[in-house]
Amino acid sequence: MSRKVDVMAAGIPDSGFVPKSPILTFMGIRIMRPDPADPTTAICEVELTDEVRNTAGVLNGGVVATVIDTAGGSAAARATGSMAIATAVMTLQYLGPVAIGPGRATARVLRKGQRSVVVQVDMVDVGDGNRLAVTGTMNLTAGPPSTDGMS
């Protein structure tokens, strides 16, 4: 039985810096409020619910990739001041499953050019002692900085 996750009813916080997306709402992905002192990081989480489990009962690999892509894009947006971010390349190494949850992806900008950003992202299984489950790197492109006061 599948159900749509109501982000607001579930108490999932609004990060205030990334627009809400229907797919993130549907998957229950939370964009955590960033540390204002560190504009090069971003964190996203997802609970291990029936809607995002695969047939083995662990977090679906496509959901993992979506959480990591969201965290990496959020870090790139914060670092560049641009909401026009696109993932060009994403390479992931799946080291183990997210079996307990939540899955937490932490993204950190490694290099920022005028229009490109390189980001390292690690996902841990919080319920399994923050065991590293997935690690990856992303190359993202950024458009001009936003003029709407995004930080």
Image (cartoon, rainbow, N blue to C red):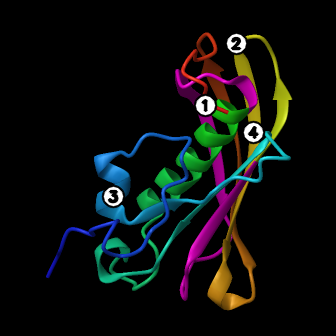
How many numbered circles does the render carry? 4
Tell me the residue at 38%/54% (across/down): 24
Q: Which mark is residue 119?
A: 4
**In this picture, residue 39 sits left or right of residue 103:** right
**Quadrant hosting residue 116:** top right
Q: Which residue is mark 3?
A: 25
Residue at the disc numbered 2: 115
Q: Tell me the magenta residue range.
A: 79-107
Mark 1–mark 2 Cα distance, whole angstroms, equals: 14 Å
- Which corner quadrant holds the N terminus? bottom left
Amino acid carrying label 2: it is Arg
> Helix, strand or loop at disc 1?
strand
Answer few, some or many: residues within 10 Å of disc 1's Cα (few below 14, many 20 plus, some between 14 and 19). Answer: few
**Residue type beneath disc 3:** Thr
Discs 1/2, front: 2
x and y, in percent, of residue 132 in the image: 74, 73
In space, the residues marked 4 and 3 are separated at their CA atoms by: 24 Å
Q: Secondary structure at mark 4?
A: strand
Q: Give the distance between the C-alpha atoms of the residues marked 2 and 4, in whole angstroms.
A: 13 Å
